[in-house]
Amino acid sequence: MDFRFEDIGPAEVKRRISAVEPLTESVRDLVDAVIRTEVDDTALDDARRQIDDIVARLRTEEKPGGFGVPFTRDLVGMPWGNAATGVRNAIAPPLRPVTHAGVSTAEVTLGAAYEGPGGHVHGGVLALLLDQLVGECASSGTSMPHFTGTLTVRYVRPTKLGQVSLRAEVTGTQDRKAFVSGEIHDSEGVTAEVEAIMIRPKEFAGRDEVMAAIAEATARD
Ligand SMILES: CCCCC/C=C\C/C=C\C/C=C\C/C=C\CCCC(=O)SCCNC(=O)CCNC(=O)[C@H](O)C(C)(C)COP(=O)(O)OP(=O)(O)OC[C@H]1O[C@@H](n2cnc3c(N)ncnc32)[C@H](O)[C@@H]1OP(=O)(O)O
């Protein structure tokens, strides 16, 4: 597991997010524009050249591999490359889950980049969002990381592209397992339901083990 520690506080986290998030949003807009544009071939080629230049500039300084999940000195995770939520990830819709009293919710708008059946959301994208939400729900509720063991999605009816709401709730726990139920709905009701078995890996028996894993990974860096 890639645990790292950065000795920074909330103000620095906020500064870093505000420096990069507008770029992520612009790239997300770019993805949507490339799907929907009807400009001619010359304009497409011109756009490609300009984008290649920008990519070369960004790559002059870059991390190897993924972004990882560094933790701040207050043990706030920064999963900024996360496929569903990452503030640096233009592929992420992005999902912004909120957990309160054991219930996680999120509202998200799924545009052209998330299409599967014509005009409707790809089933894999719905599973991704539900997977993330049940992970947040199990992990935030216990303040310990839980991984997805088994995720069962029932697609009730096609989900139209546009705004959807998600909800998840822990329905029970047994040793290191948390059972989570959830759903996605649009303006007309439920479109997909999920049942998940989330598991706290045995190396994270308690907070001390998580802290030890962070310290060990930081010492390796
Ligand atoms: C102090 C610092 C604070 C830290 C942070 C705190 C909070 C974090 C807050 C928020 C975090 C936010 C969100 C969460 C993040 C992302 C969500 C996305 C979720 C994912 O995207 S995550 C990636 C996909 N996921 C995997 O990549 C898992 C690969 N896999 C494994 O890593 C292992 O396989 C594991 C860990 C699953 C189990 O390994 P293990 O060794 O711990 O478990 P073990 O075998 O001992 O079994 C123990 C009991 O679980 C049962 N069991 C085992 N496996 C099962 C399965 N698959 N399904 C159903 N039940 C299963 C057994 O049957 C037994 O049950 P019983 O005790 O009843 O016999």
Image (tube, helix red, strand yellow):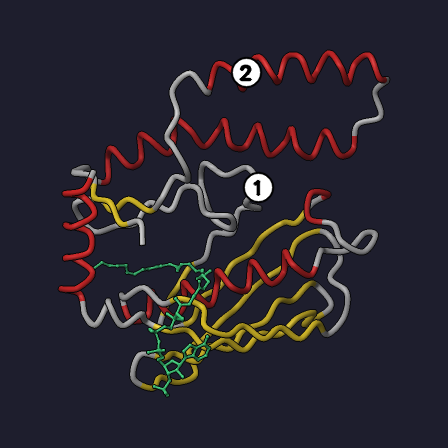
- Which one is nearer the viewer's eye here, 175 or 163? 175
User: How many numbered discs sit on the rendered protein?
Assistant: 2
Identify residue for label 1.
91
Residue 84 place in picture, x, y as percent: 51, 51
Q: Look at label 2 and name its amino acid.
A: Ile
Q: Earlier in the sequence, mark 1 or mark 2?
A: 2
Look at the picture and state if 121 lies above or below 171: above
Crowding at dot 1, Cα within 10 Å, few <14 / some 14-19 / many 20+, comes out as many
Residue 217 place in picture, x, y as percent: 21, 47
Identify residue for label 2.
54
Q: CA distance from mark 1 to mark 2?
A: 18 Å
Q: Does residue 161 appear left or right of residue 177 in this picture?
A: right
Helix, strand or loop at disc 2?
A: helix
Q: Quadrant of ligand 1?
A: bottom left
Q: Does residue 200 appear left or right of residue 92 in this picture?
A: left
Name the image quarter holding the N terminus: bottom left
Q: Look at label 1 and name its amino acid.
A: Ile
Look at the picture and state if 15 lies above or below 197: above
